[in-house]
Image (tube, helix red, strand yellow):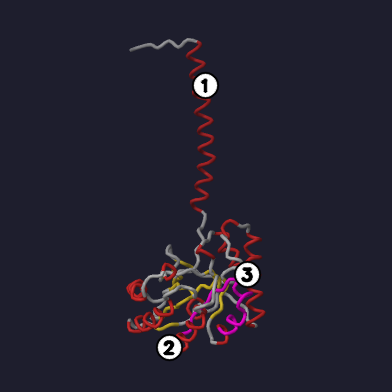
Amino acid sequence: MKLYIIDKKGILIALSCLIVALIGIGIMTSTGLEAVTTINEERKLPIYSVETDKKQVSISFDAAWGDEQTHKLLNILDQYDVKATFFLVGDWVDKYPDDVKDIADAGHDVGNHSDTHPHMTEMSADAQKKEISACNDKIKAITGKETTLFRAPFGDYNNSVVESVQSLNMYCVQWDIDSLDWKDPSPSEMVDKIVPNLQNGSIILMHNGATNTPEALPMIIEAVRNSGYEFVPLSKLVCKNCKLKYKTDVTGRVIG
């Protein structure tokens, strides 16, 4: 057996190490508990798609900038008897009030895409609600109807954004199929992007100002229908019994 003799200096070093270790444990425990809380905190998800036994999908258009393509799209949708959903930014509503009325009068959903198209995750909850409410007021002033559909600018959301939307009795809606029309793919490339990814309850994202969207839209409508799906506006797909309390799986698909 070996005996180790620790002098005064060794004792001081040992005590110092013990103190440092205890402090470290305290810090780890504190941050660990906080981390556990963060990890276990329920993640709020927007609606990306909807579980349904019906072969129904929704097509949606975000409108934030110009309106050069808007009436072309409305004419095509009317020609094919398709009802869609248009998410409008409040600034866009200010610039093109006649277009807003035309969209609503044609029977399409008019959704809220924020008032000024900011990164809402960088805002306080109160600021988020003001941003949403301001756009709601503008839409109602023109259409006479309340909107219950909201899509976050840039698709950028966190728990606070989703909770702010729900506190205003609205649905926060994303998409599960992105046409990527804003990258100006060819019409056939858009069809190839959308059709293979279709499932019951899919939500398709497009934009009213993308260059090739009007040319692609008839091809997309025909291909989707040839795949056995029908188009319904988001108000009919998302509003399951019009209850704002819903459950989603980890992909944001509304279940139950």
What residue sits 45% from the left and 85% below the top? 76
Mark toward the viewer: 1 or 3? 3
Which quadrant of the rendered structure holds the N terminus? top left
With 124 as the anchor, is 224 left or right in this view?
Answer: left
Mark 1 or mark 3: name the one nearer the start of the chain: 1
Tell me the number on the disc at residue 255.
Answer: none
Q: Nearer the viewer, residue 33 or 202?
A: 202
Can you identify the residue that label 3 sits on? 168
Magenta segment range? 80-102
Label 1 amino acid? Ser
Q: Secondary structure at mark 1?
A: helix
| x, y percent for residue 6 | 45, 12
Q: Is residue 15 visible?
A: yes
Residue behind mark 1: 16
Query: Are the two marked residues, 2 and 1, in contact with CB atoms closer than 8 angstroms?
Result: no
- From the viewer's perspective, is residue 96 above or below residue 131? below
Neighbor class of circle 1 (other Cα within 10 Å; few <14, some 14-19, many 20+) is few
**Which residue matches tag 2?**
80
What distance separates the C-alpha of mark 2 from that of mark 3?
34 Å
Q: Position of residue 211 (x, y in %)?
A: 44, 74
